[in-house]
């Protein structure tokens, strides 16, 4: 178990302090993820072709690749929310390089013990 509660990450925009995720921040990120999954799953199931003989498992396997693609596309938004919940200033996020975002996300996951 890590006792690390914060970490400084060197970025192209300078040093950034990443803290353990706050409870309020966790609730925001979690609710966004759950709302997204609920709406996308409902949409995918509604729009899936349902031949009479298709079993629930066949339906699941037919929509899983589309859901995975949607999650991958949305995960960038969730990463920004996670970083804001870990104390990274929102205004800084737009100016960072992709590798900076990856390093900050890794630090947030590490100090938050995910």
Image: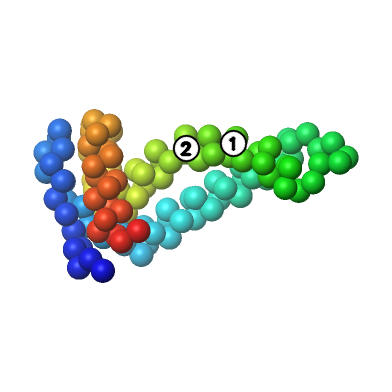
Residue where numbered disc 1 is placed: 65
Quarter of the image with the N terminus is: bottom left
Q: Along the line of sight, which residue is nearer the eye, 93 or 44?
A: 44
Q: Earlier in the sequence, mark 2 or mark 1?
A: 1
Q: Position of residue 26 (x, y in %)?
A: 39, 59
Left or right of residue 9: residue 69: right
Q: Nearer the viewer, mark 2 or mark 1?
A: 1
Q: Residues within 10 Å of mark 2 (few under 14, many from 20)?
A: few
Residue where numbered disc 2 is placed: 72
Is there any visible trace of residue 44 in the rendered image?
no
Q: Residues within 10 Å of mark 1 (few under 14, many from 20)?
A: few
Left or right of residue 81: residue 98: left
Left or right of residue 103: residue 61: right
Residue located 79% across and 46% down the image: 55
Under circle 2, the secondary element is helix
Under circle 1, the secondary element is helix
Tag 2 near tag 1, CB within 8 Å: no
Q: Along the line of sight, which residue is nearer the eye, 29 or 99?
A: 99
Residue located 23% across and 42% down the image: 103
């Amino acid at each position: 178990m890590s006792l690390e509660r914060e970490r400084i990450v060197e970025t192209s925009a300078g040093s950034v302090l990443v803290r353990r995720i706050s409870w309020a921040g966790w609730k925001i990120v979690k609710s966004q993820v759950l709302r997204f999954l609920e709406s996308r799953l409902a949409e995918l199931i509604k729009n899936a072709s349902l031949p009479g003989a298709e079993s629930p498992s066949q339906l699941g396997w037919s929509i899983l690749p589309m859901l995975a693609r949607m999650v991958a596309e949305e995960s960038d938004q969730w990463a920004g929310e996670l970083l804001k919940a870990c104390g990274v200033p929102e205004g800084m996020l737009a100016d960072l390089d992709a590798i900076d975002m990856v390093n900050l996300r890794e630090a947030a996951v590490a100090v938050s013990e995910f």
